[in-house]
Image: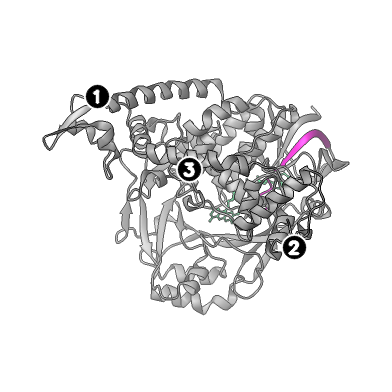
Amino acid sequence: MNKYDVIVIGGGHAGTEACLASARCGSKTLLVTQSFETVGQMSCNPSIGGIGKGHLAKEVDALGGVMAKAADAAGIHFRILNKKKGPAVWATRSQADRSLYKSFIQKEIKEQANLDYVNGEVVDLVIKKDTIRGVQLKNNEIIHCNSIILTAGTFLSGVIHVGNKSYSAGRLGEEASNKLADRMQELDLMMGRLKTGTPPRLDGRTINFDNMIKQSGDEPRPVFSFMGKSSDHPDQVNCFITRTNEKTHQLIRDSLKKSPLFNGVITGKGPRYCPSIEDKVTRFSEKNSHQIFLEPEGLNTNLIYPNGISTSLPEEDQENFIRSINGLEKVKIEKFGYAIEYDFFDPRGLTSYLENKKVQGLFMAGQINGTTGYEEAASQGIVAGINAALKSQNKQKWIPLREESYIGVMIDDLITQGAPEPYRMFTSRAEHRLFLREDNADQRLTRLGWELGSVTQERYDFFQKKLDKIETETEKLKNLKFLQEGKQIYASDYLKRPNTSYAELASLCPEHKLVDIAIGQNCAVNIKYEGYIARQKLEISRNKKDEELSLPEKINYEKISALSIEARENLSLARPQNLRQASRVPGVTPAAISILKVQIKAIKNNKEIARDGS
Ligand code: FAD
């Protein structure tokens, strides 16, 4: 029991997907985490999905991961965001019952074959000749392995700030991982500090919801997992919307000097797209009100999560400003908001497999790579888990590509551009949005996941049956004609028009029996975009040959004076593996790519490279 193929350190969203994927792929895997009781914990908002993030969660699901299934088992409020825009950017979001979510994830881990787990803190990594050999726990036990996946989240040298109080912690009520952080410092990897924050939690019994806007979930109710059904969902609840006001903003401005974010105590950069209320009031000073979503934390708790007012002001100031908000005048705060600063590693130190470039067998995933969010963490976890398993079986590792998934977009962005601020997924980060949709994530990834070993036979068979249904229905839609305004039109031509939907066919053409609505919609969107997607695919394959040219390891960017200083510096840091990655490095222009092509040719021909790149 003292030797494993893969050891995963940390049971957060990255760690759970990593250990499950590695075990599914057939590698003997151990999860070491400080406390199994906290596995699957949602450190901040009790929700999965949202814009860009829903795409990631569905891709993890398509690869056999657990996040979307847990979101279905625990989901108490489901909506599709971005519905006014095109189907490519529709985004599923679910509100989760925290404890149901956690229990589901813990059960999956307990039942997974090839997977053991142990409560323990890793304090040291055993490394010989720059290669991972094992881990050492706090009780001095050494466990041997071929690969490690480090997913320590916000725990490495974590420091919590509330007003002028600062103390060491990994999350509220949990110890930071300082010994391992010290050991990581010794490895001399590129590191930095980032910060994130969370709002206070409120007692719902002390809130007056009467004058707030009620927000119900969508009907028909969306489902997260490709294998899920709405009958998997527990009871559903409503959320409510209230707003800050001029008085709230004045109270916040008055206490800014006590905020660690503004008085210089916090130095790490925070997530720009998930700012604290202190940030919002100062950065958008022209706005006299901000929206707050009041989201229940579960079915058997009175706790309410006020989404939109993350704060690290002193406790009494948090209470004052919150009580100035409509409906919260008498609210009881159960837990105060806080900010946390932590160590992260510059992801330019990783390969596309998420393996460290300096230490063989050290994979890294999640918040420690400079990302923020559960879905971003889970996506990296599943990639690291699959690749660590493939490595232990001496198989070719997997590079997720930009044109095939949002997971590929994120990893490519991280390893080429680093994380100057916490990285969050948005649909705008992807070039091939019409193809990278939520509804076709399984068609993009499930076969691949099955070949890699991360998708079970049961899921693969389920997917094959769905493909057959899609093929049959698409064929029918291409042959189906009906009368509209006195003219015969094909259903497929009708679906290509803007603002048409599959569901409308029921009234336009009653003799056509609609299939399962998700399958029908998927066929309709495929038909709508088929011309654009074919053009995108052609463009991708045209560029592919050039982009896949690998950059020789011995290339010395500092010496290529034809490149700008910025390009030289950033290429030296990122050390991209091929021209495709190089093109994403900040400062690398199309002209710089031409210079690099000449360099590749010269190195291949063993020629002296001229300093001007010719
Ligand atoms: P985590 O979920 O942090 O898990 C880390 C795991 O590693 C834990 O289980 C821990 O016990 C374990 N561990 C650490 N060190 C060791 C060790 N040495 N040995 C063994 N086990 C170890 N995301 C958003 O999208 N929006 C937000 O507004 C937001 N706010 C946040 C606010 C706070 C206060 C925090 C803490 C996080 C917030 N996040 C937010 C981020 C989100 O929680 C994380 O991105 C996500 O949980 C990261 O997952 P992870 O698996 O990388 O790490």
Q: Judge left or right: residue 234 versus residue 608.
A: left
Q: Which mark is residue 561?
A: 2
On the image, the x and y values in percent for residue 613 come to 73, 57
* Disc nearest the viewer among 2 and 3: 2
Which residue is pictured at 80% across the width and 44% down the height? 359
Which residue is pictured at 48% across the width and 43% down the height? 55
Q: The residue under label 1 is which amino acid type? A: Lys
Q: Which mark is residue 55?
A: 3
Q: Which mark is residue 513?
A: 1
Evaluate if marks 1 and 2 touch, with contact meaning CB atoms under 8 Å apart.
no
Among numbered discs 1 and 2, the one appearing first in the sequence:
1
Q: Within 10 Å of the Cα at label 2, are there few (<14), some (14-19), or many (20+) other Cα atoms?
A: few
On the image, the x and y values in percent for residue 564 come to 69, 64
Evaluate if marks 1 and 3 touch, with contact meaning CB atoms under 8 Å apart.
no
Which residue is pictured at 55% across the width and 32% down the height? 63
Q: State whether residue 128 is above or below residue 194.
A: above
Q: The residue under label 2 is which amino acid type? A: Ser
Q: Judge left or right: residue 180 versus residue 50.
A: right
Does dot 3 land on a helix, a strand or a loop?
helix
Q: Foreground residue, 10 or 138?
A: 10
Q: The residue under label 3 is which amino acid type? A: His
On the image, the x and y values in percent for residue 250 come to 45, 78
Q: Foreground residue, 488 or 317?
A: 488
Is residue 16 visible to us here? Answer: no
Q: Is residue 541 magenta?
A: no
Considering every residue shown, the one lying at the far left of the view is: 486
Among numbered discs 1 and 3, the one appearing first in the sequence:
3
Does dot 1 land on a helix, a strand or a loop?
loop
